[in-house]
Amino acid sequence: MSRPALPVAISCGEPAGIGPEVAAAAFAALAHEVPMLWLGDPRHLPEGTPHRLVNHASEAADPSPDALPVLAQDFGRPRQPGVADPVHAPQVIEMIARGVALVQDGHALALCTAPIHKKALKDGAGFSHPGHTEYLAALAGVDDVVMMLASDQLRVVPATIHIALDQVPLQLTPRTLRHVIEITHAGLRDLFGIAAPRLAIAGLNPHAGEGGTMGMQERSWINDLVTQMQGEGYGLTGPLPADTMFHAAARARYDAAICMYHDQALIPIKTLDFDKGVNVTLGLPFIRTSPDHGTAFDIAGKGIANPTSMIEAIRMAHRLGQNR
Ligand SMILES: NC(=O)c1ccc[n+]([C@@H]2O[C@H](COP(=O)([O-])OP(=O)(O)OC[C@H]3O[C@@H](n4cnc5c(N)ncnc54)[C@H](O)[C@@H]3O)[C@@H](O)[C@H]2O)c1
Ligand SMILES: N[C@H](C(=O)O)[C@H](O)COP(=O)(O)O
């Protein structure tokens, strides 16, 4: 059944970051193939970005090659590239919520979020979530979601995300790891069309604990959980020593790597494919992607940001949204 034409909603993210410029570049690259709707203050778009103000998402339902459709929101002040303005923080958050509402109300196909500056939102608006992922789960009313970073070369999922390293062993439990595995399995099957997903589970400790000589989590519960879920039909291997999971031959043996903490997952994918990595949230009742990078204040406004990740994020949002 062909779906009605709907735009990918793009939340503007932190105006002082590279979000507006990579969104404008993505529009230039994709305008003929992907209908888009940018949510933000048009004054924050790079000078000369061809755009048109719309009052409703339906005015952006088809590709708009000549001008980026903008559902405008007055942010109160212009932006200063590289310097977050606390006055903007509440509106940055509101654009995310507006994008979610558009998708949930059937006016947008999917949501692609431009990078936010987590501390700027905390300082400027008391944003209590560690990032988009947790905020989107709250907006959607779901408890468990998963952050996957995906590219042609690798898919990774950190079982814990934006928490201090000394909290990782405390937050990692059989329940949390099971949920991450279940949601990742379902996402690969349902969104990425992988009928029997193969998941490689990284150990927490060096050498996956080396039989308990370098940490006990593998021996005390991770091994058992993997064995139990294998018995339930999940295609799992591990827990594996993380340092030998990411070379080419190892990557060929799985569809996604489940890692124990943020950097164990994000270092390999941002090393292998920083330009084309896409952040996709699994477990939401709608499609959400974002580029794999952040606000890049050090280069914001200089016109040198690479838009490829944003382009791939919008392209993936469109593709996954159409396949739902
Ligand atoms: N999806 C998101 O909203 C998201 C993702 C990552 C980081 N962040 C946030 O962004 C802020 C800055 O984070 P960070 O400094 O750790 O990471 P970052 O990705 O913003 O920047 C890290 C380095 O990579 C460079 N870089 C990033 N994107 C680039 C691009 N498209 N082209 C060229 N160079 C690029 C930057 O110039 C910088 O030197 C933090 O508040 C962080 O939480 C948000
Ligand atoms: N993928 C990014 C990273 O961790 O490098 C980002 O922080 C993800 O956070 P969100 O929950 O804001 O998408």
Image: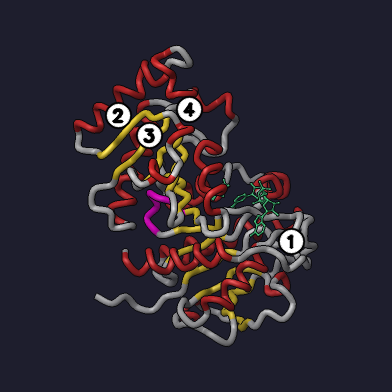
| Earlier residue among tags 3 and 2 | 3
Mark 3 closeness class: few <14, some 14–19, many ≥20 residues within 10 Å: many
Provide the residue designation for mark 2.
Answer: 226
Q: Position of residue 216 (x, y in %)?
A: 43, 15
Toward the viewer: 244 or 46? Answer: 244
Q: Residue furthest bottom?
A: 66
Between the C-alphas of marks 3 and 2, the distance is 8 Å
Between the C-alphas of marks 4 and 1, the distance is 35 Å
Q: Position of residue 260 (x, y in %)?
A: 46, 32
Is the residue under label 2 in contact with that under label 4 (CB below 8 Å)? Answer: no
| Earlier residue among tags 1 and 2 | 2
Provide the residue designation for mark 1.
Answer: 300
Mark 4 closeness class: few <14, some 14–19, many ≥20 residues within 10 Å: some
| Circle 3: element type | strand
- Mark 2: which amino acid? Val
| Earlier residue among tags 3 and 1 | 3
Residue ID at (67%, 68%): 21
Q: Position of residue 107 (x, y in %)?
A: 43, 72
| Earlier residue among tags 4 and 1 | 4
**Which label sits in the foreground, 3 or 4?**
3
Mark 2 closeness class: few <14, some 14–19, many ≥20 residues within 10 Å: many
Membership of 285 in magenta stretch: yes
Residue ID at (52%, 36%): 264
Per the rendering, the mark at residue 171 is: 4
Provide the residue designation for mark 3.
Answer: 201
